[in-house]
Amino acid sequence: MPAELPDLSTLSYLERYGYLPPGAAGPDLDVDTVAHALARFQDRMNVPVTGRVDADTRSELEAARCGMPDLVNGLALKALCPWDGPELRYAFGAPCTNYEGAFEAVERAASTWAGVLPFVLRRVESTQEPDVMVEWRPAQDPDHSMVGTVVAHADFPGPCWTITEAPPKPLHFDDDESIWADGAIRGAFDVETVALHEFGHLLGLAHTQVPGAVMYPRVRHHYVLRELQPDDLDQVCSLYPASVPT
Ligand SMILES: [Zn+2]
Ligand SMILES: [Zn+2]
């Protein structure tokens, strides 16, 4: 058990990603509550469970990741609400300023999901009342800050929303602090890999603790994961019984 509380940024992290209740991060927290939250985080991130901020844990806390929570209402649910079809219509807003091919990569990620779902993900113009707006935004993103370790965020569908109930829902990438690319490039994130993950949230999937699954919350440079994994497909099947197992 820690003798004293971790720094406020660690507490804020634990709150932001669901390990502490909303509004809990602050100097009045008791050390056992924080140790329990850290233990859950360590378990989720597959590092030794010590309940304190050791070197492995610090490294996980500072790692690039998706901005969506790991736990929802304190629960480790992998699937939340399904997208209420009959289709998901997405449009492109502000482009990526450091990689021109980014929108094509997003379209490939949408096609991958469409391949297993009982409805289509269709690209429309931004003037056609899209369900989802895909764009690259400043790190100080007004709807969900991406300053620091967050490289992208989206939202959950239907009543499970956390960012906006009204369309268009966000699929936002950090245009300030992250370098984007096509493929496994040193110092850059593969757009298709991250887009595949973020579409998963819009389709109702939450984070998993299975490393190597698309819905794992950590994101890495120099890394490509463009195919849905067994753990992802299990969640798709639970949300969409008419989906196509592959
Ligand atoms: Zn995520
Ligand atoms: Zn945003």
Image (cartoon, helix red, strand yellow):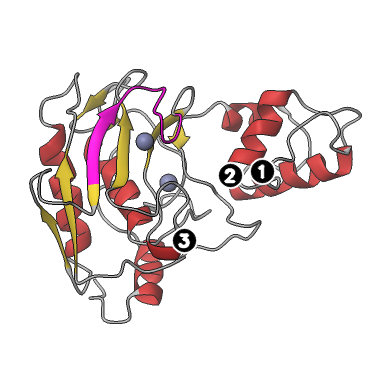
Residue 42 disc label: 1
| Residue in front for this viewpoint, 179 or 22 | 22
**Percent of width and height locating residue 103:** 13, 37
**Percent of width and height locating residue 99:** 16, 23
Q: Residues within 10 Å of mark 1 (few under 14, many from 20)?
A: many
The answer to whether residue 14 is left or right of residue 66 is right
The answer to whether residue 12 is left or right of residue 98 is right
Could you tell me which residue is drawn at 77 percent across and 27 percent down?
A: 6
Residue at disc 2, secondary structure: loop
The amino acid on which the numbered mark 2 sits, given as a three-letter code, is Met
Magenta span has 142? yes
What is the spatial separation of the Cα atoms under label 3 and label 2, in whole angstroms? 24 Å
Q: Mark 2 points at which residue?
A: 45
Residue at disc 1, secondary structure: helix
Residue at disc 3, secondary structure: helix
The answer to whether residue 114 is left or right of residue 57 is left
The answer to whether residue 32 is left or right of residue 188 is right
Q: Outermost residue, bottom direction? A: 242
What is the spatial separation of the Cα atoms under label 3 and label 1, in whole angstroms? 25 Å
- For the stretch drawn in magenta, the main secondary structure is loop
Can you tell which of label 3 and label 1 is closer to the viewer? Answer: 3
Magenta span has 137? yes
Could you tell me which residue is drawn at 41 percent across and 29 percent down?
A: 142
**Are the two marked residues, 3 and 1, in contact with CB atoms closer than 8 angstroms?**
no
Could you tell me which residue is drawn at 10 percent across and 40 percent down?
A: 104
